[in-house]
Image (cartoon, helix red, strand yellow):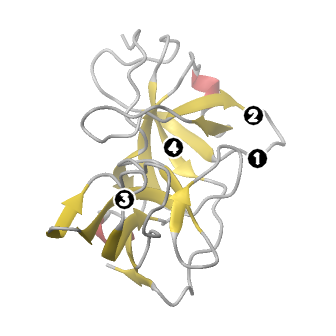
Amino acid sequence: MTATAAPNGFRPVNHVGGGFERSKVMLQGGIASGYNATIRYYDPVVLNANGTLTIATPGSAFSGVFIGCEYDAVGRTGRLSRIWPANQVATNIVAYMISDPSMEFTVQANASLALTAIGDEANWVTGAGNASGYSTAALGALVGAGNTGDFRVTGLYEIPGNQWGDAFPIVRVTMNRLTGLLPYAGAVAV
């Protein structure tokens, strides 16, 4: 029973066409040096007009889910990280994200959901993150018929003790409110 709220962001689990390695995008210079917010593993992000990622805003169009970065910092080269630390000054920055709308993710809901949630949409809610660098974003309340949410519920994540009607079920979702990514010249599918 998922009675405890312990969200871990939007974790990739399946691609509708099979596999998911082809769903990654690499962005050279993908985060601005000194960007003042922490971006955590599995946080929704948005690609700005200048080609850099920032943390997305719940209820607004976004570009994908952050899956790490690499950069050179003062005294350290080739750092590979799950997070972008707030205010990090760096060079040779490369950011990775998943932007494929056919990618399915698991996420914990921040309230109980019933089987009737399948096909409905919801926005995401931010979290403070955890010590391991993972996002603690969760799925928010369903937006209801005729309204657009950030993610669409596709089913229950089938693990022992996880059921519809639990206090904080873990569900499968796809990205729904995506903003265009390609043909940004710095974006490369990897």
Of marks 4 and 2, which one's residue comes earlier in the chain?
A: 2
Q: Position of residue 38 (x, y in %)?
A: 43, 48
Report the amino acid beneath label 2: Val
Check residue 148 in the rendering and tell me which mark sits there, or answer none. 1
Report the amino acid beneath label 3: Gln
Q: Position of residue 160 (x, y in %)?
A: 27, 19
Q: Are marks 3 and 4 in contact (CB under 8 Å)?
A: no
Tally of numbered discs:
4
Relative depth, front residue between 184 and 146: 184
Relative depth, front residue between 90 and 157: 90
Q: Would you call the spot at circle 1 few (<14 residues within 10 Å), some (14-19), or many (20 or more)? A: some
Q: Would you call the spot at circle 3 few (<14 residues within 10 Å), some (14-19), or many (20 or more)? A: some
Residue in the picture at 42% in, 39% down: 9
Q: Which residue is mark 4?
A: 173
Q: Position of residue 83 (x, y in %)?
A: 32, 52
Q: Quadrant of residue 190?
A: bottom left
Of marks 4 and 1, which one's residue comes earlier in the chain?
A: 1
Distance of label 4 from label 1 (alpha carbons)? 14 Å
Report the amino acid beneath label 1: Thr
Q: Which residue is mark 2?
A: 143
Q: Are marks 1 and 2 in contact (CB under 8 Å)?
A: yes
